[in-house]
Image (tube, rainbow, N blue to C red):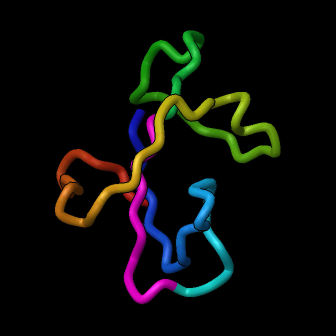
Amino acid sequence: MTVITATDRQRDPAGIGYTAKRSPRLQFERFTLAIPPAHKELGKLKPKIQASSTQTYPIAGREAIVEKDINITDDTLI
């Protein structure tokens, strides 16, 4: 599953995350989540908010993107 996030925070120079400082423009990232084999039907997936969410849906990929790379029809935006 692919999820796109947007934030108004500046990227951390180490490339790990973001700082508390505001960015002059929105920062977008695409995350690819690994769906556990127990979730056979993606359409019926009901994500749970919990402290160990990285163990439930591990991040398989992460990339910075620009707004023009977002497909409004197919992408999920948070």
Left or right of residue 5, residue 11 in this image: right
Residue nearest the viewer, comparing 47 with 14: 14
Residue 27 sits in which quadrant? bottom left
Q: Give the range drawn in magenta.
A: 23-32
Q: 64 above or below 68? A: above
Count of numbered marks: 0
Residue 39 is situated, as x and y percent measured from the top left of the image, at 54, 17
Give coordinates of residue 40: x percent, y percent: 47, 13
Question: Which quadrant does the N terminus fall into?
Answer: top left
**Residue 2 belongs to the span the image colors magenta:** no
Q: Tell me: residue 19, above or below residue 44.
A: below
Q: Position of residue 53 (x, y in %)?
A: 71, 39
User: On the rendered structure, is 21 left or right of 52?
Assistant: left
Q: Residue 48's spot in the image, x, y percent?
A: 68, 40
Q: Main secondary structure of the magenta part?
A: strand
Q: Nearer the viewer, residue 14 or 51?
A: 14
Farthest residue toward the front?
A: 13
Q: Is residue 1 left or right of residue 48?
A: left
Give the quarter of the image for residue 55.
Answer: top right
Q: As drawn, which residue projects farthest toward the right?
A: 51
The residue shown at (68%, 80%) is 20
The residue drawn where x is 60% and y is 67% is 12
Give above or below for 39 relative to 77: above
Residue at 23% over, 56% down: 70
Residue 28 forms part of the magenta stretch: yes
Q: Is residue 47 left or right of residue 72?
A: right
